[in-house]
Image (cartoon, coloured by chain):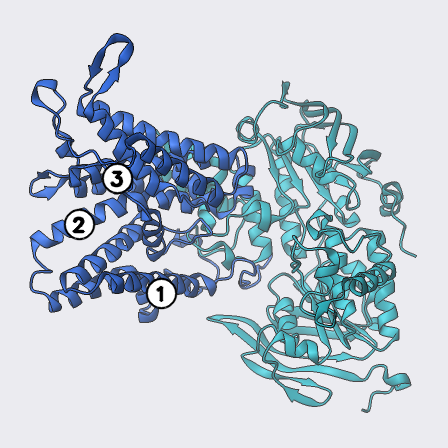
Amino acid sequence: MTAPSQETGRGEVVLSARNVGKSYGQIQALKGVNFDIRRGQVTTLFGENGAGKSTLMKILSGVISPSSGEIVLDGQTLRFASAKEATARGISIIHQELSLAPNMSVRDNVFMGREITRGGAVDYAEEARQTRALMEELEEDIDPATPVEDLRLGQQQIVEIARALSVNSRILIMDEPTSALSASEVEVLFKVIRDLTARGVAIVYISHHLEEALTITDHAVVLRDGAMTASAPREEIDLDWIVRNMVGENFDLGSPPTGYEMGDAALSLRGLSVPSANGTRLAVEDLSLDLRAGEIVCIYGLMGAGRTELLECVAGRTAPQSGAIVFEGEDMRRLSIAERIARGLVLVPEDRQRDGLVQTMSVGQNLSLASIGAFTRGLFTSRRTERGLVDASIRDVTIKTDGGGAAIGSLSGGNQQKVVIGKMLATHPRVVLLDEPSRGIDIGAKAEVFRLLAERAKAGIGVIYSTSEVGECLSIAHRIVVMRRGRIAAEFGADVTKEEIMAASGEQVAA
Amino acid sequence: MSDQSTAPARKGLFSGGFDLGRLLLEGRAFFALIAIILFFSYQSPYYFTTGNLLIMSSHVAIFGLLALGMLLVILTGGIDLSVGSTLGLAGVVAGALMQGVEIQAMGLTLYPSVWVVVVLTLGLGALVGLVNGVLIAIFKVPAFVATLGLLYVARGIALLMTNGLTYNNLGGREELGNTGFAWLGFNRLWGVPIGVLVLAAVAILCSLVLTRTAFGRWVYSTGGNARAAELSGVPVKLTTIAVYMASGVCAAIAGLVLSSQLTSAGPTAGTTYELTAIAAVVIGGAALTGGRGNVRGTMLGAFVIGFLSDGLVIIGVSSYWQTVFTGAVIVLAVLLNSIQYGGRGSRAPRKASPPKAA
């Protein structure tokens, strides 16, 4: 080819999309996208949720076929009949949503569908050996025989990555590979990516962590509303350029709301200890924390620091081993989740698909699910009151939907998240706990969520949100609490720097 | 609601426009029922007469009652295999009560009146459901296994109570004040068999509960996503126990209606009826994974099965072929279910147009 940099064929175009479009019914998910993937380079796709990134990746990896346009591999136009065919051509994908069988071991998952056989029987020893080697490469201490369901989300993601690596693909597509990884795990992944590109593998990378993605990018492509808005090599771009092209305007995640008096302590945790899911250790250890009405506290920590366990315990899903949870002067420990919601203590869970939404119900039924009592008159529910409540919620949290009757699946990720938040806000809470409210949603929706929380705080609601993105700590929070191995490692005011937070969390500041 | 629809219109279930394929798919149970009635009316002049329709409906009543209870259970994502046995046990217990309860210590025999028998029998059904529900909700026994166990236990108790024999005298005696058992299913009111009226009443009640009460919402959300429901304050365990109790009560009602219709109560009544009930629910469009389904569909499903098998009897098709036909209808229904729900994958929802920041 005519690419200027010809050393070991680096920079040579291996796969390109030519005018690729895809429509679902009347929705145009992609509108004639053109771009190239080069050998030995990391091509990063930026774009908000619903911009068409995942759709494009599914087309490139043969999971779905385009409605128009074509895919050119090594100068040859083709149409993949299936994902398997794409894999055979050396293209593999790490999906955003984990596609592991939780009941099977790490080893079995890595080699699922490609079992190594000897004399007709599966050679488990060889599979285990190779899995162990992959885990070593990823610097993760996971035994190949462990069932996947016993692993943390971050570790599961590592397994997913190991599976893609084990295929030895020429083109590796990574759709949000780091959304559940800690900073140190991300570092390792990036090292692996650099190794791969040095070997000539072409990487397509998608992430919502813009800064993080920038450190690994060689070439950036930005999508907006299903169309490509910009494309440039790393040297010519910066964060502002990406954000500008993604959303068309400058964005910040807000600042701590001011100009009002905070109330008394609304929620007090005293010496709280929570056992981990498998009961072998303490996920939260002797933790004390106070939250005042109208205050916003951010809990920062790596995966496994105990943030989720802490919030789920306070909300009532799990019982503490010891310690007290006092909400507006009342001991919460013996109360059920429903009773805590009724008193005004609510949780917006981390995983909206698994814990937040009922997929079989409409947007409206999801929004009203936590406040059924509010529209029940005697024995029966009142449709009119419910509709009023749903419409008010849709307006309040600015959900973009056809109305309360729309299917949950018709909403974008950010709007689905707003449904989960809106559902809990509809119960008129006094304290809202949000576990990673920004996980997997685009920057525009993120800013809206934070704006919403800041508004509520001004109205006197106490807010605790957890995050694994340092940038999100420095937005609306009055106070930043850093958790490390189940304990509070440090507490900062809003004037803290990113470096201080990361150092306190035990994270290595990226070199 | 329309003032909120600022997002671009999507091709949804309820969007305007006439789509014949979708209409046929959504209303498949209804169209199947029409087709069945038309076909058998053409085959036999007797089929489409008021008399026959009422007789067939009274057969449907039994399956329909079981199917309504089953629907509640299936909506929560469970299954209740014990309803056929519960039906049999309820009939036998009612039969035994009608024969009089001998209290040996006092040397006298009590003859409870029919309403007492009804209440006790329904209580028995609720008890079987309670055992099911507690096993499933509290002890986390898989619903399939727990209710399979109860299927055997209930049937065994029914056989033990009667030594395998059947109670033939359910009429009661005037002087004992326990007549009126025939009123539960055998007799007619305004020309309609009581069993059919009972079915209609229970169906309306179920429909109201599912669509208009908080409990109904709990049922749908428990089946749709139990974890999300629990975190939203829905009493998931209580809901689970309640639906199995409701299913047990429905089975007991069916047992009373059936023994009244037959004027006898045998311990083997209702064998394999649980499968017919499941079939009715599935034909009615409910998803076995929970969260989707309604009373209207389930009723149509029950009528499809009942009218089909009775029609085959009327035109003289052998009972072996009836079994084959029933099976084919069930498979077809499940096939259509997967077409209907398969397209809208729940794991990877379609992305709507991206939201613009407000």
Which amino acid does the dot numbered 3 rest on? Ala
Residue B254, disc: 3
Vertical order, A397 against B164 (above or below): below
Q: Chain of mark 3?
A: B
| Chain identifier, blue in the render | B
Q: CA distance from mark 1 to mark 3?
A: 27 Å
Q: Chain of mark 2?
A: B
Residues marked 1 and 2 touching at CB (< 8 Å)? no
Q: Which SS class for mark 1?
A: helix
Do marks 1 and 2 both belong to one polypeptide chain?
yes
Give the image location of residue A440, x and y in percent: 66, 55
Density class for disc 2 (Cα within 10 Å; few <14, some 14-19, many ≥20) is: many
Give the image location of residue A360, x and y in percent: 46, 52
- Quadrant position of residue A248: bottom right
Q: CA distance from mark 2 to mark 3?
A: 13 Å
Tell me if I can see residue A203 in this picture.
yes
Please state which of residues A198 and A414 is positioned toward the viewer in this rendering. Answer: A198
Earlier-in-chain disc, 1 versus 3: 3
Which residue is pictured at 55% across the width and 31% down the height? Answer: A341
Residue B332, disc: 1
Which residue is pictured at 67% across the width and 32% down the height? Answer: A313
Residues marked 2 and 3 touching at CB (< 8 Å)? no
Q: Nearer the viewer, mark 1 or mark 3?
A: 3
Q: Which residue is mark 2?
A: B57
Q: How many marks?
A: 3
Q: CA distance from mark 1 to mark 2?
A: 23 Å
User: In which quadrant is the C terminus of chain A drawn?
Assistant: bottom right
Which residue is pictured at 62% across the width and 50% down the height? Answer: A448
Please state which of residues A245 and A133 is positioned toward the viewer in this rendering. Answer: A133
Q: Is residue B229 left or right of residue B49?
A: right
Q: In the rendered image of this protein, which colour is used for chain A? A: cyan
